């Protein structure tokens, strides 16, 4: 009977991850680590999700994310929105120094599924921003991106 219980637990429906905020948060951010943009895009509620995925691709072309860690997460009292502070660790192709950066992700529930609808720098200015945040100008970073080169 122990094998049956283990088998039932491991056969959860794929959409179940989208219904539970901690699982959606983990799957989206893990998809960024592995550069699995098909999975990552399925969690975006951006007006221009294709453009956001193209931007994420450009940002991650020159880096290798080695770790993602949700530092804190909170579902709002209404159960329809949430925020998460996420730290990424990465290194660039040009140097092998590990950098860390933080972003605040905002999520909302759409038709029962958790989707990310925004990201911004963390409120602690002593922490570097995530490598996935857009530049303040809204443009992709130039070659030799200073945000990625800063330690």
Image (cartoon, helix red, strand yellow):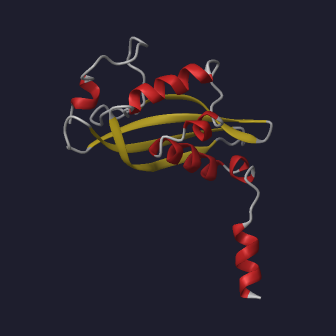
The mark tally for this picture is 0
Is residue 78 something one can see in this rendering?
no
Residue 75 percent coordinates (x, y)? 63, 44
Q: Horizontally, is 49 left or right of 29 in the view?
A: right
Residue at image coords 75%, 49%: 15
Q: Is residue 115 left or right of residue 120?
A: right
Residue 25 versus residue 43 in the image, above or below: below
- Residue 140 percent across, percent down from the top left: 39, 17
Relative to 127, 27 lies left or right: right
Question: Which residue sits at x=37%, y=32%?
Answer: 131
Viewer-proximal residue, 44 or 75? 44
On the picture, is 44 further left or further right than 120? right
Horizontal and vertical percent for residue 104?
47, 35
Task: In the displayed orientation, state which residue is furthest to the bottom.
Answer: 1
* 145 and 75: which is toward the camera: 145
Residue at the image position 77 percent from the left and 88 percent from the top? 1
Single out the residue that lies furthest toward the right.
111
Rendered-image quadrant of the C terminus: top left
**Which quadrant of the figure has residue 112?**
top right
Q: Where is residue 30 in the image (x, y as percent from the top left)?
A: 51, 48
Q: Can residue 38 be seen in this view?
A: yes
Q: Residue visible at 76% across and 57% down? A: 13
């Amino acid at each position: 009977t122990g094998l049956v219980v283990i088998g039932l637990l491991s056969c959860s429906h794929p959409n179940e991850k989208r219904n539970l905020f901690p699982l959606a948060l983990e799957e989206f951010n893990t998809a960024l680590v592995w550069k699995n943009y098909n999975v990552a895009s399925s969690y975006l509620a951006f007006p221009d999700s294709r453009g956001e995925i193209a931007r994420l691709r450009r940002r991650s072309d020159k880096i290798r994310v080695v770790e993602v860690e949700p530092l804190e997460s909170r579902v709002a009292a209404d159960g329809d929105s949430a925020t998460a502070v996420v730290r990424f660790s990465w290194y660039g192709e040009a140097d092998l120094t590990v950098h860390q950066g933080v972003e605040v992700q905002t999520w909302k529930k759409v038709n029962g599924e958790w989707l990310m609808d925004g990201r911004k720098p963390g409120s602690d200015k002593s922490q570097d921003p995530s490598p996935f945040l857009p530049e303040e100008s809204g443009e992709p970073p130039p070659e030799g991106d200073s945000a990625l080169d800063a330690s």
